[in-house]
Image: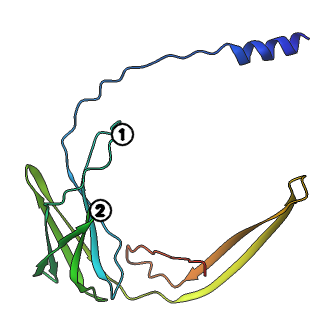
Amino acid sequence: ILFQACILLILFVSCEKKLDIDLPESEKHIVVNSINSADSILQVSITRSQNALDNDSVPVLKNAIAKVYKNGTFIEDLSYSSNGLFESSFTTEINETYSITVEYEDLNSVSSEFTLLPPVPILNVDTVIEIETYDDGGGYFFTDYEFHYTVSIEDNETTDDFYFISVSRL
C-alpha cells in the first residue's frame, strides 16, 4: 500500500516553472530553398527568416528580385508564381552550373550556386516487406505493411554531392 501511495503522490504532485526568456530580435535574412533536377523548370522558394519563437507563418518575399545565371551568363529574372515559389521559363540541364542572386528591400542580398551532375548508376535495390495482421477484438482484422529499401549507388568519393531518392506508390 505504501508503494501505491507513492505512485499516487507522484501522479498528483508536479512541479512547473515558467521561464520568461527575452530573446533579442535578430537581423532578418533572405532564405532561399530549392530542390533541382535536370530537365525541369527551376523552382525556388524565397522567404525571410524569423525569430525561433515566432508562431506566425513564414514571411514570403513576393517582390524579391531573383536573377539566374548559367555558367556565369545572365539568363533571366525568376517569376513569382504562388506560395512563395519563383519559377524559370527554361529547363535546367546536366553538367551546367547555375547561380541565383536574390535581392529584397532593406535585406542583404544572397546568392547560391549549383551544378547538376549526371545521374549515378544504381547498382542494386533490395526490398523487404514486413506484414503484420492484427485483430481489434471486435471481429475486424487490420494489416500493416512496412517497406524497407536498401539502395546501392556508384558514388564518386572525390566530390561533395548529395542525392535525392523519390519513392511513390502506384
**Residue on which disc 2 sits:** 83
Q: Is 49 rendered above or below residue 80?
A: above
Instruction: Look at the picture and state if 147 lies above or below 4.
Output: below
Q: Mark 1, mark 2: which one is toward the viewer?
A: 2
Residue 156 figure quarter: bottom left
The amino acid pointed to by label 2 is: Asn
Report which residue position mark 1 lands on: 55
Compare residues 164 and 120 and report the one nearer the observer.
164
Dividing the picture into quadrants, the one containing residue 3 is top right
Whether 20 is drawn above or below 98: the answer is: above
Q: Is residue 3 left or right of residue 35?
A: right
Task: Name which residue type carries label 1.
Answer: Asn
Residue 126, percent from left and from top? 68, 81
Looking at the image, do the residues carrying marks 1 and 2 touch, with CB atoms under 8 Å apart?
Answer: no
**Residue 18 location, x and y as percent?**
46, 18
Q: Earlier in the sequence, mark 1 or mark 2?
A: 1
Element type at marker 1?
Answer: loop
